[in-house]
Amino acid sequence: MGRLDGKVALVSGAASGIGKAVSQRLTAEGAVVADCDITEAPGGITCDVRDQDACIAAVATVVDRHGRLDILANVAGVGIARLIGELSADEWRQVIEVNLTGTFLLSQAALPELLASTGTIVNMASVAGMRATPYNAAYCASKGGVIMLTKSMAIELAKAGVRVNAVCPASVDTPFLRNFKIPDGADMSLFTRAASPMGRMVDPAEVAAAVAYLASDDAATISGTTLVIDGAATA
């Protein structure tokens, strides 16, 4: 038997990287998983998390298909590396709207169903929301916001039985990170402070394992926490 047998989960950003790994792990743990992404995929739910109506429709589709919703994993995210003096307002808005506002909108859309099932939310934050990284102001601000959004929701929803937690990984070996372009003129010495003492990146499956734990009854009294996965980089 799996820890998540009988549960229905919605995973945003499920087309690749961490989101795909989370979808696979929750499925392996016994959950019925609805994949959600801005990229269309067979059987998946197409959703731009910046769009409130799209978020509401995504949740409605899950309930129409499966009758309930127990787990929401907010994984969809973007990042743009820029010198702070060169970061455009549009770029700033894109990162904030996907990472932070999207997490809020999909959580809000899912809330009635999660209240009915006394379900759980797991948000994808980052160590960049806890300790700044260079040339990453919008991303750091968005992930710091996700952490505080998580804590606020956890307090508000605790008596209703809905748990809300965040996972804070360091550098994860994904296409997102491999395609992350450092801006011209960057001072590479500034990146040394983010190095993991373990000497390697985090595997997406390791992040997915943390999400599965927080979504399970093994974490029944854990809410409002940020589970850091960084090989002691922020220790």
Image (tube, helix red, strand yellow):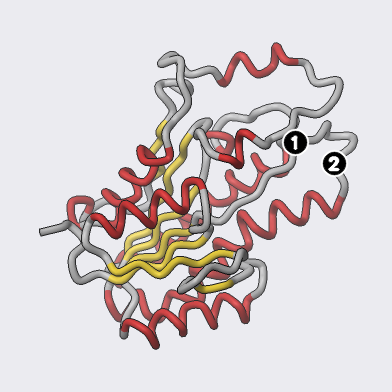
In this picture, residue 183 sits left or right of residue 6: right
Quadrant of the frame with the C terminus: top left
Neighbours of disc 2 within 10 Å: few (<14), some (14-19), many (20+): some
Residue at image mark 1:
81
Tag 2 near tag 1, CB within 8 Å:
no
Residue sitting nearer the eye, 2 or 223: 2
Rendered image quadrant of residue 94: bottom right
Sooner in the amino-acid sequence: mark 2 or mark 1 = 1
For residue 87, the mark is 2
Residue 157 locus on image (x, y percent): 37, 67
Q: Amino acid at mark 1?
A: Ala
Residue 11 locus on image (x, y percent): 44, 62
Neighbours of disc 1 within 10 Å: few (<14), some (14-19), many (20+): some
Residue 13 locus on image (x, y percent): 53, 58
- Residue at point 39% right, 88% down? 64
In this picture, residue 152 sits left or right of residue 209: right
Rendered image quadrant of residue 73: bottom left
